[in-house]
Amino acid sequence: MAGASRAEKHVLFAARSATALHRLLDVLPVFAGDDRIRRRFTLVPGSDFDADALAAVERAGGRTIPWAEAVTRPHDLILAASPKGGLAELRGPRVLLPHGAGYNKALGEKTETESDGPGDSASGMAPALLMPGGRPLARLHALAHPSQVDRLATECPPAAARATVTGDPTLDRVLASLPLRERYRAALRTHGRRLVVLTSTWGPHSLIRRHPGLPARLAAELPHDTYQLGLVLHPNEHSRTGGFDLAQALAPALDAGMVLARPHEEWAALLVAADTVVTDHGSAALYAAAARDVPVIAAGDGGGELIPGTPMAELLARVPVFTSLDRPTAADLERAVAAHRPGVPAAAAGQAFAERGHAVRRLREELYRVLGLTPLDAPAEPRLLPDPAPPARSLAAFAVQIDRRGPHLHIERRPARSDAPAHHLAAEDGRASDTQLQSAGLLFRRAGHTAGHPVRGETWTVDGWTRHALDEYGGPRTAAVALSASHCVLRRTGGALLSVRVEPHREPDGRIIRADAAAVLSGVHAWLVDHPGTPTVPVSIPCLIADRTHHATLAPATPAEAQQEI
C-alpha cells in the first residue's frame, strides 16, 4: 500500500431499517483487507421497521454502538442508505447511497411509511431531508445511474452538485454470482423444474397485501414436478409481520414446498436461480432483469406510489401482465411467459444501472478519497451470494392426475388439498397423515426414511414393509419403496413383488434430468390399475412428467431386492 498512512480511520455504517442495513453490508468489500479501517454500526432511531435492522450485523459479529454514543464522537466517514432520521447529528463526512434500485416511488401517505419529507418527492430525495437547516446533509451522493443524478438535480439541485455515478454494489454481487446459478438451483432442490419467483414490496399497494392468497393458490395450482415457487418479500414486510406470523400466514404455500427467501442476500440468489419473475412495483425485479434475460410478469401498478418514467414504471409498462391474480392457473402463467419479448426487461432495467461490474471499484475510489487514504493495491471484488436455503417443508401427499396420451402416461402431481380432479392420492409413509394414508391408492416410502418406525435399531426389508403397508391399510393399493431416483420396488395388493428401473430424460444439450421416483411410481400404479391381474413382464411404461419422458421398466423383483434393508 504505497504512500498509505497507518493512521486508523473510523467508518460508521448508520442504518435506519433492515433494507438500508443490507445495502450498506454490500459496500463492505470496498474496505476488505484494510487493517487501517475500523468499522462500526449504529441504528438510526425513528423507523417503524428497525426491529430487524441489526440482526445481520450481529450474526456476522460486527461491532455496534448505541446512537447516543454515535452522536458524541467524531467519525472519519459515515455511510448511510437513507437520509431519514437524525443523520445531521452525526459528526463526520456523510456519504449517501440509494436504499434500492433507484428512486421509483413517491410515498405520499404517512401511514406505515418512514417518510419524514413531502409526499410528492421521490422517496429519499426530499429537499427537507437532504438540506436540513439549509446545509447539505451529505458530502457525497453515490448514485447508480446518470438518470438518478438528473432526478436529484430536479428535486434538490444543491445535493445534485455533490453527486457522482458509482454504480450499484448489489447488482455487482448478482452479476458476479451468475456462474453459480446451477449451484443455487441445486441448493433449492429445483432440479429440472421451472422456478417462479414472486417479488413483493411493502405497504398497502404491494402484491402480498393486495393478493395475500396468491402464493397458496399458485402452490395448489401449479404442477409440482413442473414448477417450483419462491417468494421474495421486502425486508419491511418481514419486520412488520414477524417471522412467526409470516410463516403462519403463508403456511399453505410453505407446506407445498414454496421457498421464502430470507431478506438479506438470499433474495438475490433466488433471482439468479429464477426462470420467471412475477413482480409488483418493488424494484427487486430490476436486478433479475438487469442480470439475465428472464421473463418478468407484471402483477400490480403501484396504486399511485410508482413515479411515471422511472425504470420500474417502464419495466411494468413493457412486460406481460398476470391478469388472473385472484384465480391463477398454470395456463395463465404460461401465456404470460410466452408473451415475453427477449431484451425488453433488460432494456428497462438498463435505465437503473450504470458502471455494471465496476461499482465496488468506483465506490472504493470515492470513499477512500473522502477518507484521505490511498486504497490497497489488491482489486476490490464483490462478494458472491451465498447458497440459498432449501424449502423448509416438502409435500408428503399428492393429488395425482393421469392423462393417457397414446402410449404415454402424462402425470401431474399437486398438493393433496388441491381441488383439481385426481386419479389417485399418493402418500408418503412416515410423513403423511393417517387420513391421507388411509385414502391413498399409492403408499410410498423412500429408503432411509424411518420416521414411522422410531424403535431403536428396527428397520424393514422391502418385502416386509410392502406386505405390512398393504395389510395395515387394506383395500386395493400399491405399496412402493424408492430405493433411489432410478430404482424402485413395489407390490400391488395380492400381487408379486416387482422391480422398477427408471431411465432419466436426456436433453439434446447433454443434460440428464431425473424425475422424482415417487412421480414415476404414480405412473406405474396407474398402469397397474389399468392392467389388473399379473402383468406380463418385463414391460416398459413411458411416463411423461413435466413434458419429459421417463421410461419405467417393470420386471420381477430379485431375492436380493426383496431382502434389501430400508
Image: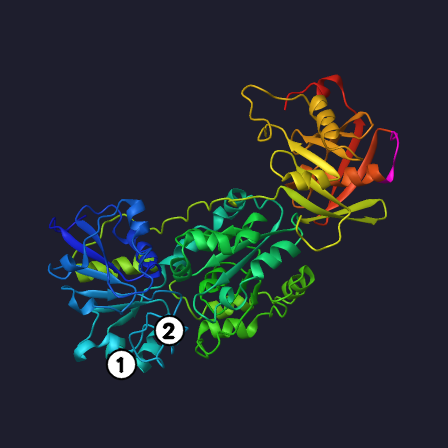
**Residue 209: where, in percent of width, then height?**
49, 66
Of circles 1 and 2, the one toward us is: 2
Q: Earlier in the sequence, mark 1 or mark 2?
A: 2
**Residue 244: where, in percent of width, then height?**
43, 51
- Which residue does the image show at 52% across and 69% down from the upper left? 210
**Residue 68: where, in percent of width, then height?**
15, 59
Distance Cα–Cα, label 1 vs label 2: 29 Å
Residue 516 seen in the figure: no
Q: Kindly state the secondary structure of the residue where label 1 is placed.
A: helix
Looking at the rendered structure, the kind of residue marked 2 is: Thr
**Residue 472: where, in percent of width, then height?**
72, 29
Q: Is residue 293 shown left or right of residue 58?
A: right
- Which residue does the image show at 28% across and 62% down from the upper left? 16
Q: Which residue is mark 2?
A: 111
Residue 254 in the image: above or below residue 151: above
Tell me which segment is drawn in magenta. 530-536
> In the rendered structure, are the residues bearing label 1 and label 2 in contact, judged by CB atoms less than 8 Å apart?
no
**Residue 550 position by quadrant:** top right
Q: Is residue 533 magenta?
A: yes
Q: Which mark is residue 157?
A: 1
**Residue 419 position by quadrant:** bottom right
Q: Which residue is at the front of the view, 211 or 524?
A: 211
Residue 283 seen in the figure: yes
Q: Is residue 79 magenta?
A: no
Q: Is residue 373 shown left or right of residue 143?
A: left
Q: Is residue 430 shown left or right of residue 178?
A: right
Q: Which residue is at the front of the view, 339 or 378?
A: 339
Looking at the rendered structure, the kind of residue marked 1 is: Pro
